[in-house]
Image (cartoon, helix red, strand yellow):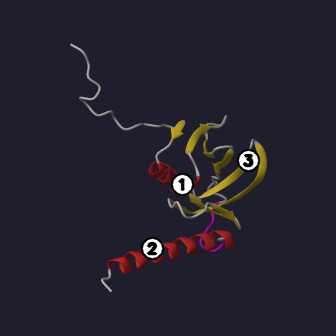
Amino acid sequence: MSYDPTSQPLPAPCIIDLGLIVNNEDIRRILNDLGRVHYIHTLDEQLQTEGEGWIVEVFSDPHQATIVANRSLYLNVQSFDYLQLYRSPTQETYFDLIQDNRRLRLIPVTQSSQTQPSENNLDAATLEAMVTQVLAARWDVQLDNDDDCPF
């Protein structure tokens, strides 16, 4: 008796701390949870820019750009071919977004409980990122509601 691989669907991939992700929806889900990151942008393995910022928005749209400016990251998963997960020597996971010879490395910035921002000492970038997310979500809801309107 021979095994017919088409008789049963293959299980969905299971990626734990290391691996390659090509599905845009999977990439979006991972990036949405990162928050504050240290980013390193290289082109042809040459450092272009480096900094720290907040992931403000992760989206999938062939007509919009990925933008990193003013300590804010607006990431379009369609700007990249795939995401590669790695583990550092200290066992922390970091992420490389790859598109041809361009690499955008995202290293999550973790804060200890002593440096955790409180309600009274949020910095301007944190507050701006939070307000932007709320406003973007509200606009999305309004646009969705407008699409349902028959006039």
Which numbered disc covers residue 89?
Answer: none
Q: What residue span does the magenta drawing correspond to?
A: 116-121
Whether label 3 touches label 2, CB < 8 Å? no
Element class at badge 2:
helix
Query: Which residue in the protein does label 2 denote?
Result: 140
Of the residues under marks 1 and 3, which one precedes in the sequence? 3
Q: Is 89 situated left or right of 18 in this image?
A: right
Secondary structure under the numbered disc 3 in the rendered image:
strand
Q: Quadrant of the C terminus?
A: bottom left
Which amino acid type corresponds to the residue marked 3 in the rendered image? Thr
Q: Which residue is mark 3?
A: 42
Say left or right for 143 vs 96: left
Query: Label 1 to label 3, Cα distance in Å?
Result: 18 Å
User: In the rendering, at what x and y percent does residue 123 appear?
Assistant: 68, 71
Residue depicted at x 64% and y 63%: 67
Answer with mark 1 or mark 2, whichever residue precedes in sequence: 1
Return the x and y of residue 96 as percentages of the image width and height: 62, 44
Q: Residues within 10 Å of mark 2 (few under 14, many from 20)?
A: few
Marks 3 and 2, how far apart in space?
A: 32 Å
The amino acid on which the numbered mark 2 sits, given as a three-letter code, is: Asp
Q: Residues within 10 Å of mark 3 (few under 14, many from 20)?
A: some
Q: Which residue is mark 1?
A: 78
* Discs 1/2, front: 1
24 lies left or right of 75:
left
